[in-house]
């Protein structure tokens, strides 16, 4: 951002004039309160893809280095204390079985660096899962994943923040390849078996994805399926919305509103979607701000009663960019989106809605969601939090990138 104090103060003044001092103050406070998790997998070599498996220079080579990077990101943002883990990437020696002792050591290492472990992701998609994980016709494979899921629950409760997030790669490439009903039922049975043996005071969020790796079908393709499964499990289960897992043009904010209206527990994997599951960093686009508006209205973000808040995580790992910068960029984009959502005058909006003033309602909404420049709000919040006003600039100036490039040859 590289903005002067004068620019920030002028900006706050202009915004206060348009949206009111109170709304601007509430927006600053919301930005200070909003916490979001960093995905451990963004800070390594996963997701290199083509281009000779290109990975940004200085990428972490092991869990300790990932934690170092996450701790540095936290130092710059002040809002990303938690680090999400994947069972078979972070707590396993062979990529087949996860180990509680490793998780214990990783939790200790995180604490030593001033951060904490967040959501635990059972890993259903490495070796041995090509015919499915919970949907595999092989009972031993199913059992291996059930045990991993139960262990994830124990780790979440004892070493992390009590949240387990489930994403299944299960599905098929061609019509007729699998029996759709049988696979769904296998997944449901394994899920129920796992849930019954997991601690009762944790939260299990079920992620959906419209395709990939399944091209013809995925076993949990949409929020409705996640919703049905979560309902079947019980009150400790909910739906995880990953922005990249929808068809083009899906009205995600409406999904969010429905989940909130139905009192379903929820969580987010934030990213930007251009093509399919492209894992791009979050951008401060209109959709993001509209989603935040529903979260704000639904009182599931920055609620004083922490239990009411949804779980907020970033899920990205773009193949070309510097991922530390990209994560800082995502945090910035989320804060800007939240700030814009906080500026919407919902009382006035409701009046326009009731009076059927379609265009006036749309213009009022967009004045905050699209037209407002929320950067002074985010800058002010950072000043009050005692973190750099521009985290990316601070990152570049810190010399951290040069250091890791040298050390991690
Ligand atoms: C799958 O595409 C996903 O969104 C799930 O959340 C996984 O846990 C994550 O990406 C990493 O593969
Ligand atoms: Mn995800």
Image (spheres, helix red, strand yellow):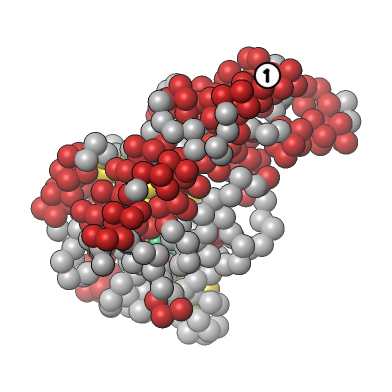
What is the secondary structure assignment of the residue under circle 1?
helix
Residue 278: % across, % down = 53, 65
Q: Which residue is mark 1?
A: 13
Any part of residue 384 in sight:
yes
Tell me if 401 is positioned left or right of 303 in this view: left
Residue 334: % across, % down = 54, 41
Tell me if 34 is positioned left or right of 295 in this view: left
Any part of residue 119 in sight:
no
* Front one among 406 and 67: 406
Tell me if 289 is positioned left or right of 317 in this view: right
The residue sitting at the left extreme is: 101
Tell me if 67 is positioned left or right of 392 in this view: left
Residue sitting at x 82%, y 34%? 363
Q: Is residue 398 above or below residue 171?
A: above
Residue 166: % across, % down = 37, 56
Q: Residue 76 occupies which quadrant of the picture?
A: top left
* Front one among 64 and 140: 64
Residue sitting at x 42%, y 57%? 323
């Amino acid at each position: 951002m590289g903005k002067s104090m004068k620019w920030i103060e002028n900006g706050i003044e202009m915004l206060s004039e348009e949206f009111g001092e109170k709304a601007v103050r509430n927006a600053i406070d919301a930005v200070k309160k909003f916490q979001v998790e960093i995905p451990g997998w963004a800070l390594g070599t996963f997701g290199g893809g083509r281009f000779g498996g290109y990975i940004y220079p200085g990428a972490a080579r092991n869990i300790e280095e990932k934690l170092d990077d996450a701790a540095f990101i936290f130092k710059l943002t002040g809002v990303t204390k938690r680090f999400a883990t994947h069972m078979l990437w972070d707590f396993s020696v062979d990529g087949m079985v996860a180990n509680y002792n490793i998780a214990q050591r990783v939790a200790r290492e995180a604490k030593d660096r001033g951060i904490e472990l967040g959501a635990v992701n059972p890993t259903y998609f490495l070796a041995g899962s090509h015919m499915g994980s919970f949907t595999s016709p092989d009972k031993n494979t199913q059992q291996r994943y059930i045990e991993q899921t139960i262990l994830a629950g124990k780790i979440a409760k004892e070493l992390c923040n009590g949240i387990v997030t489930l994403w299944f790669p299960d599905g098929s490439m061609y019509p007729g390849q699998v029996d759709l009903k049988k696979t769904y039922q296998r997944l449901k049975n394994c899920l129920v078996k796992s849930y019954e043996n997991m601690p009762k005071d944790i939260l299990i969020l079920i992620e959906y994805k419209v395709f990939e790796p399944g091209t013809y079908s995925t076993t949990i393709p949409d929020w409705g399926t996640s919703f049905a499964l979560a309902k079947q499990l019980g009150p400790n289960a909910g739906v995880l919305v990953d922005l990249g897992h929808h068809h083009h043009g899906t009205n995600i904010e409406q999904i969010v509103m429905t989940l909130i209206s139905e009192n379903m527990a929820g969580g987010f994997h934030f990213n930007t979607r251009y093509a399919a599951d492209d894992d791009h960093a979050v951008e401060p686009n209109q959709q993001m701000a509209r989603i935040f508006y529903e979260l704000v209205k639904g009182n599931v973000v920055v609620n004083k009663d922490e239990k009411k808040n949804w779980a907020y995580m970033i899920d990205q790992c773009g193949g070309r960019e510097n991922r530390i910068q990209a994560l800082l960029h995502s945090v910035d984009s989320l804060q800007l989106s939240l700030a814009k959502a906080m500026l919407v005058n919902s009382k006035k909006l409701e009046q326009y809605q009731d009076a059927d003033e379609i265009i006036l309602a749309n213009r009022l909404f967009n004045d905050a969601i699209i037209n407002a420049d929320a950067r002074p709000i985010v800058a002010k919040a950072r000043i009050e939090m005692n973190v750099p006003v521009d985290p990316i600039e601070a990152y570049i100036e810190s010399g951290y990138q040069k250091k890791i490039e040298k050390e991690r040859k």
